[in-house]
Amino acid sequence: MVRIILAAASTLALAACAVGPDYHRPVAPQSAAGAFQTASPAIVASATANDRWWQLYRDPVLDGLITDALTANTDIRVATARLARARASLREVRGDRQPQATAGASATYGRLSEIQRPPGLDRENWTIDTGLDVAYEADLFGRIGRNVEAARGDVGAAQEDADTVRVAVVADTTRAYADAAAAAERLAVAQRIVALIDRSLKVTEGRARVGLITGLDTARIAALRNQRQADIPAIVAERQAALFRLATLTGRTPAELPTIAAARSETLRLTQPIPVGDGAALLARRPDVRAAERRLAAATARIGVATADLYPRISLGGSIGSTGTGLGNIFGAGPLNWLLGPLISWNVNPAKARARIAGAEADSQAALATFDGVVLTALGETETALSNYARALDRRTALQAARDQAAIAARITRAQQREGQIDSLAQLDAERTFADTEAALALSDAQIAQAQIDVFRALGGNWTV
């Protein structure tokens, strides 16, 4: 019987056609495919790349932390579970393409009236029913096929969502590590500034003891020293917060973070231009763009699912069974019955089906608008990140020049103050300027590292090492 049903189903499948629109991948604006407007050749390269962009920093500790994050991060585990759920749903939908078989059996004990009792049988006896039902839906109008197509789109979107989470986790892990290292460097700078002011304070106190200057001059230098000392606890707190974030991102409690993760005391720096490719490579690489495209494909397929409800569903089925008054009758010479034939069901309320089609078409339009928005966002984020990175480098160049000049001025005023050529106000002003520019330069290095990571995140994480 099953062979007969499958043969008939194969014949019908040859005549089947899928209703609803066929999916066509959307085309990004032509202007999006070229080079980035804010990509300066001095700081970026046009080369395309692989995924391990963090290796550009050449830090084995960072490499190990990224591996830990990709393995144990809780957000990645959630995304992976959602992908597994989508794949299970796809397998479930694919099951509709297979014949559906149901086996059943029942046994009852009862008493018949004298009139109902067949000759030769006891009035009280067991009645046993067994049966096997087989049905196969002939997908003449593509309802099942479109459902499978939509489920494939859902799986693709879930896969890209998981990759989007991985890109974010890698960027956040790198940033937490960079912030901790930059804070350590800024802490060293702050401590060095305090030590320099301490030396100036000692000189000032010595001159005050011999009556060359007043106590007011000493108080001013001491106030500057205490102001700079007050910066240190805030920097320490920033560093601890970055390390705690790093522990969370790598799936650890703060107490479990290895000591080596906090050992770096210099800001992350690149020794080569960042490879960025072009707009076309960006859109092909960004997982959120790919996820939006897959959701559009799924939404388009669901128009076909809704459209198929306008047409009849044809199933080929059959059943075989037996009813007897005991196991001997069932498996021996008991009565056998079987049925074979098609079943046609048709929705007699097309208005509801057309409403579902309209809803599916609206969902498809929303998915298309979402895709377009994600494309524009990807391009805008990348251009912004590249612009911010370039401006951060320009700012650091200016701060470096200012800090160098302030250091020269501070050295000169210290010598002049020791010789009594200038008053304490001039020295105080020089010391304050040097302290400000030194701290600003250290903060600028941290901001450059953050800007680089923002570029990496915007580009989606594909790099050539």
Image (tube, rainbow, N blue to C red):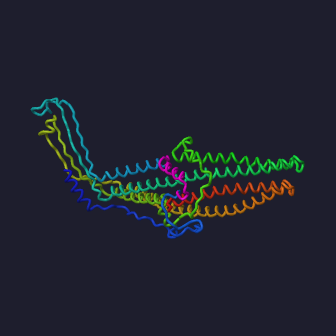
Residue closest to the far left:
120
- Name the image quarter holding residue 257: top right
Point 57% across, 57% down: residue: 453
- Image x and y of residue 207, in percent: 86, 49
Front residue of 207 and 106: 207
Quarter residue 428 falls in: bottom right
Query: Residue at 20% of width from left, 40% of height from top?
Result: 130
* Side (left or right) of 133 relative to 352: left
Instruction: Using the rendered image of the protein, determine whether residue 351 is visible from the camera's viewpoint.
Output: no
Residue at the farthest right position = 211
Q: Which residues are magenta?
A: 55-75
Query: Residue 144, how many percent across, how many down?
Result: 33, 55
Residue 457 counted in the magenta span: no
In-image side of 321 versus 361 (left or right): left
Where is residue 303 drawn, in percent x and y? 39, 59
Give the left or right position of residue 334, taking residue 141 as reference.
Answer: left
Q: Nearer the viewer, residue 135 or 267?
A: 267
Res 16 visible: yes
> What secondary structure is the magenta-colored segment mainly?
helix
Percent position (x, y) of residue 89? Answer: 38, 50
